[in-house]
């Protein structure tokens, strides 16, 4: 079952990394970036692996209300 997630990372997502998350909403807030969208468990794990492989520092992963 898919859930709506909010993922916060340290720093900014460049254009190339943003295209990786084309189905997700990406925005910058002060010194970190927020990725939001609806994901199934396997999709969430793949997204987190991509972030890890890219050397991105994860700040927070949580379920959130769409909006």
Image: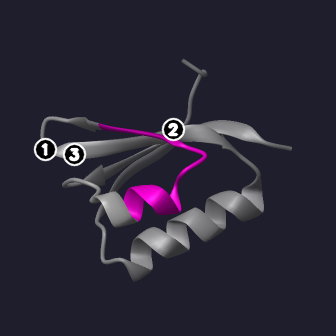
Horizontally, residue 66 falls left or right of residue 12, namely right
Horizontally, residue 3 falls left or right of residue 56, namely right
Q: Which residue is mark 1?
A: 31
Task: Report the residue that reaches farthest toward the bottom.
Answer: 53
Label 2 neighbourhood size at 10 Å, few (<14), some (14-19), many (20+)? many
CA–CA distance between discs 2 and 1? 17 Å
Q: Which quarter of the image is occupied by the N terminus?
A: top right
Horizontally, residue 31 falls left or right of residue 29, namely left
Work out whether 23 lies above or below 56. above
Q: Which residue is mark 3?
A: 32
Q: Secondary structure at mark 3?
A: strand
Q: Residue at x 43, y 69 (%)?
A: 51
Residue 18, magenta (yes or no): yes
Q: Which residues are magenta?
A: 17-27
Query: In the rendering, at what x and y percent does residue 37 appear?
Result: 59, 38
Query: In the rendering, at what x and y percent does residue 33 appear?
Result: 29, 45
In the drawing, what numbered circle is on residue 62? none
Q: Quadrant of residue 43?
A: bottom right
Horizontally, residue 15 falls left or right of residue 47, namely left
Q: Are marks 2 and 1 in contact (CB under 8 Å)?
A: no
Query: In the rendering, at what x and y percent does residue 41 appear?
Result: 75, 57
Q: Which residue is mark 2?
A: 36
Work out whether 10 lies above or below 45. above
CA–CA distance between discs 3 and 1? 4 Å
Q: Secondary structure at mark 2?
A: strand
Q: Residue at x 46, y 58 (%)?
A: 19
Q: Are marks 3 and 1 in contact (CB under 8 Å)?
A: yes
Q: Quadrant of residue 42?
A: bottom right
Q: Residue at x 55, y 43 (%)?
A: 24
Label 1 neighbourhood size at 10 Å, few (<14), some (14-19), many (20+)? few
Query: In the rendering, at what x and y percent does residue 12 appear?
Result: 22, 53
Q: Secondary structure at mark 1?
A: loop
């Amino acid at each position: 079952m898919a859930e709506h997630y909010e993922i916060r990372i340290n720093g900014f997502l460049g254009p190339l990394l943003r295209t990786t998350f084309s189905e997700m909403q990406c925005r910058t807030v002060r010194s970190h970036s927020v990725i939001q969208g609806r994901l199934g468990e396997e999709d969430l794990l793949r997204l987190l692996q991509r972030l890890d492989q890219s050397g991105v520092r994860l700040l927070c992963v949580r379920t959130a209300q769409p909006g």
